[in-house]
Amino acid sequence: MEILDGPRAAAKPERHTAGIRVVTPFRGMFAVRDKLMDELYTWLDARDLTYGPTLFRLHVVNMEADMDVEVAVILDDPVKGDDRVTAGILPAGEYAFLKYVNHGRQANKTLLEWVRAQNLALDVREDPSGDRFGCRYEAYLTDPRTERMKTRWQIELAIRLA
């Protein structure tokens, strides 16, 4: 893993999103993510919408069972969704984050260890379905459509603090 920035904490503003949210088993989750990205890009392109980075948002994390995840993009303005793509918000707040290339599991471990070492509290609550996050996401700073090698993507991993 190559760390490009962080880990550190910083305030982030509220941002508009459009995305597709699903519940899927942890095993196979990234194949689902890739299919949802293609579906979302097709939807956005059909509407000629300009958008920022692609997000992979983790609403509920349960690596032993089902994950509640969303593939979304950041927008300058709200958009009207439909029965598949919904408008959303990345909430404002203080976030712990890390920008990296390659090895997402190691990046998550590094960020979570840093949060513990700093005695920071995450915006998360335990739930029977798993850990429910106020906001946890990966932002793909590299466009997945122009760089197919995931090991080359620059990614911002961010988790909102309590």
Image (cartoon, rainbow, N blue to C red):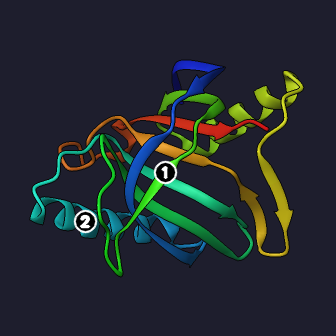
Q: Is residue 43 shown above or below 97? A: below
Q: Which residue is mark 1?
A: 89
Q: Quadrant of residue 128?
A: bottom right
Q: Are marks 1 and 2 in contact (CB under 8 Å)?
A: no
Pointer 1 or 2: first along the chain: 2
Q: Quadrant of the N terminus?
A: top right
Residue 51 in the image, given as x and y percentages of width and height: 25, 45
Q: Is residue 16 left or right of residue 124?
A: left
Q: Residues within 10 Å of mark 1 (few under 14, many from 20)?
A: some
Q: Is residue 52 left or right of residue 119?
A: left
Q: Amino acid at mark 2?
A: Asp
Q: Which residue is mark 2?
A: 38
Q: Amino acid at mark 1?
A: Ile
Q: Secondary structure at mark 2?
A: helix
**Whole-Å distance between the Cαs marked 1 and 2?**
21 Å
Outermost residue to the bottom: 83
Residue 42 in the image, given as x and y percentages of width and height: 17, 66
Front residue of 87 and 100: 87
Q: Is residue 150 left or right of residue 161?
A: left
Q: Is residue 50 shown above or below 25? A: above
Q: Quadrant of the C terminus?
A: top right
Q: Residues within 10 Å of mark 2 (few under 14, many from 20)?
A: few
- Nearer the observer: mark 1 or 2; the answer is 1
Q: Secondary structure at mark 1?
A: strand
Residue 134 in the image, given as x and y percentages of width and height: 69, 51
Q: Residue at 31% across / 62% down in the picture?
A: 37
Q: Is residue 65 shown above or below 145? A: below
Q: Residue at 67% across / 39% down in the picture?
A: 160
Q: Residue at 35% across / 81% down in the picture?
A: 83
Q: How many marks?
A: 2
